[in-house]
Amino acid sequence: MTIFLELINNPTKYKLNKKTKEVGRKLLYKIYCMRAFTFKRLKKIKLALLDFNRCIINNPPSHSLPRLYTEKAYLHFKQGNFLDAIKDINKATSKSTCKNNVFNYKEYFLMGCIHIRFSNFNMAISMFDEEIGILGRFYRGSKITSKAYAYILRGYSKIRYQNVEDGIEDMGLGLALDKNCSEKYKKVFQNIDEGIKNIIRIRFNVSIKD
């Protein structure tokens, strides 16, 4: 990597023509991108953030910018850096176009989670509404787990916003898509009144651990 960077950053010194330099930049972006996702998978958040930043400054294709900023926002969210997460979500939104914004349902998911974190449940509901809308329009036969999580968190937000019946129905939709949701979002279910949990257990025939 060090030798490659030296070549790309000093094209005149090494007599690289314009085409070679452009190809090198594209390769550099791809290398940083693959390494960033690898670090993310390994839960090495700081290293992943560094490489996503390097992706962004190395002239990536414009259609990839919303996803790169969204990935950064997710990592900031995992670190508890909510302000940085919001900044990157806004950047992702500003870079989106009609052609690529279908891939950024994650922006709405993250904003919904941030609003839950600060007990802004009405705003959280609107974010999950948007996410579910995108998933329904463009991912009808896929992203099942993402849809399930969105319904669970929208349901939780509705319950906390005192719209209990609609919240229970959303919980049911999420559990129907992925029964493992109750384990994934164990803390969410722990924050629901025991009486409401019992209704969910009985109505949808699911086991929810306390």
Image: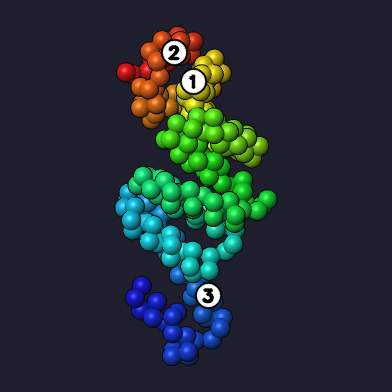
Whole-percent x, y for residue 146 in the image: 50, 35
- Which residue is under mark 3? 23
Label 2 Cα crowd, 10 Å radius (few <14 / some 14-19 / many 20+)? some
For the residues labelled 2 and 1, say whether their Cβ atoms are less than 8 Å apart: yes
Marks 3 and 1 sit apart, C-alpha to C-alpha, by 53 Å
Residue 155 is left or right of residue 180, and the answer is right
Marks 2 and 1 sit apart, C-alpha to C-alpha, by 9 Å
Amino acid type, mark 2: Ile
Q: Is 28 rendered above or below residue 121?
A: below
* Residue 137 in view: yes
Label 1 Cα crowd, 10 Å radius (few <14 / some 14-19 / many 20+)? many
Whole-percent x, y for residue 78 in the image: 37, 44
Q: Earlier in the sequence, mark 2 or mark 1?
A: 1
Which residue sits at x=43%, y=35%?
Answer: 118
Whole-percent x, y for residue 116 in the image: 45, 33
Q: Earlier in the sequence, mark 3 or mark 2?
A: 3
Which residue sits at x=34%, y=76%?
Answer: 2
Q: Which mark is residue 159?
A: 1
Which residue sits at x=54%, y=51%?
Answer: 90
Which residue sits at x=45%, y=10%?
Answer: 199
> Which secondary structure lies at badge 1?
helix
Q: Is 41 rendered above or below residue 12?
A: above
Looking at the image, is mark 3 or mark 1 nearer the viewer?
1
How are the colours assigned in the image?
rainbow
> Which secondary structure lies at badge 2?
helix
Amino acid type, mark 3: Val
Q: Which mark is residue 196?
A: 2
Whole-percent x, y for residue 202 in the image: 45, 9
